[in-house]
Amino acid sequence: MTERRPLMTPLAAVTPPRHMAHLVASRSYLSYQKDELRDKLKHNPYSYIQVINPDTSGDVDTSRGTGAFFQKVRAEYDAFKSKGWLVEAEEPEWLVYRQSTADRVWTGVVCNLDLTRCAEGGLRTHEQTLAPREALFTAFLDAVGFHAEPVLCAKPQGTIQAQADNKVLAETTFNPAHTDFMTADGVRHEIWRVPVHSPSGKAFADTWGREDVLYLADGHHRLASSHRLHEARPDLPGAKHILALVVPEEDLTILGFHKEVRGIPMTRERWHEALQSLRGVCTVEPSKHGCAVPTEPGQITVALQGESWTLTRRPGCEAATDADWVNVHLLDNILGIADARHDKRLRHLPEPHRPEGGWQAQAAAHPDRILVLIHPIPFSDIRAVADAQGTLPPKSTWVEPKIRSALFIHEFNDAP
């Protein structure tokens, strides 16, 4: 019987030279405020932000999101390589990456994932994607020919395989890192490079390279667009892979994604009546801690006009997660929001974007809005949804770590 191709494989990554890594790698383009982005573009010519913003100089008159614009991105990328600001490894490697903050440490393996194995169930997902975004991302990938940001995956723990994986990882990170730098946001980044033909490289192939099932934590549109490209361009050998950071499941950080509803006429009396109608599916009590994030799964905090309540789901509720429960019983049944992805009255609020003073301050500042705070969904629930081939509601989880763009790049045409 023929052995299946491995799910995780090493790659000859394109990376910044270690003395420039702190200058080249960038946060996600969308995470920058306009003034912050302008400052970065003006003062750091080495930033990958320059690559994906080739219109900065005003010399590019093509519209963003078009094939011509994407070709300009590729040209800027090639210019970075010609200047030595991005360098391709001479041979495939396993790359160990550690990200540290004052509170958390995440350590995982950067590698390629075989897309055929992913489609066969090797990579399980929990989010529905949008066809227009898939098409746009596919066009971008086809034009530029590289992945500059890995998808984030979780590796199951508690198995004999996981113990062997962890041992190899610990032995590698016991040694000094090849690259070690800190960025202005207080995050430390460390990278260990493990050549595939070294003894450590063979140990990785015998452990991490034998993983059979992973769970996608972040990057569903990047995965979907990569599948599309793989099907459309069988002539691109490297397009059969996607760049990934694989982290042990227990090391992931899952934070809440809250909701704010605007523009729905709701008097206090009517809101009280609506809450009473929920008593069949939850208990309703005034919140003991004000407008605060719930302390355990199964609880939801809602706030309106200076009042806060704790809703506790009753046992046996059919909703798979608290986010599902909120979508059905609060957003749809009471507030008339049937499409949580597109309804403009609904805002999704990631916990890391909590306003100064907390969510209580946000509620006090906008007494005409309904605030819904949700406890982070345990990864065991996310895994159960993925195993059942289900999906979570849009914007249900904020997952960390967030890895910087261009710290690791997988080039399609140069892949083996």
Image: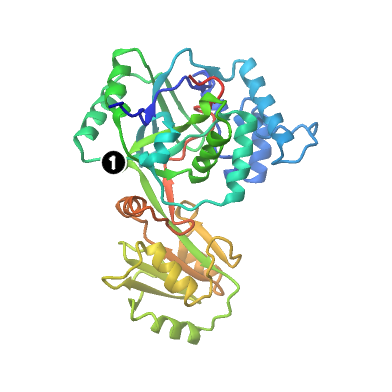
Residue 276 is left or right of residue 361, and the answer is left
Indicate the position of residue 59 as horizontal and vertical percent values.
80, 31
Which of 182/415 is in front? 415
Which of 237/334 is in front? 237
Q: How many marks?
A: 1
Indicate the position of residue 359 as horizontal and vertical percent values.
46, 63
Question: Label 1 is placed on what type of residue?
Answer: Pro
Q: Quadrant of residue 10?
A: top left
Residue 65 is left or right of residue 102, and the answer is right
Which of 179/167 is in front? 167
Q: Vertically, is 371 above or below 75?
A: below
Question: Can see residue 40?
Answer: yes
Indicate the position of residue 201 as horizontal and vertical percent values.
33, 18
Q: Quadrant of residue 97?
A: top left
Picture residue at 38% right of the left edge, 52% below the top:
389
Q: Vertically, is 125 above or below 316?
A: above
Q: Dot 1: what SS?
A: loop
Picture residue at 64% right of the left edge, 15% below the top:
82
Indicate the position of residue 79 as horizontal and vertical percent values.
67, 20
Quarter of the figure with the N terminus: top left
Picture residue at 54% right of the left edge, 17% below the top:
87
Picture residue at 64% right of the left edge, 25% below the top:
77
Which of 132/248 is in front? 132
Question: Can see residue 356?
Answer: no
How crowded pointer 1 is (Cα within 10 Å; few <14, some 14-19, many 20+) is rated as some
- For disc 1, the marked residue is 156
Q: Vertically, is 66 above or below 13?
A: below
Outermost residue toward the front? Answer: 1
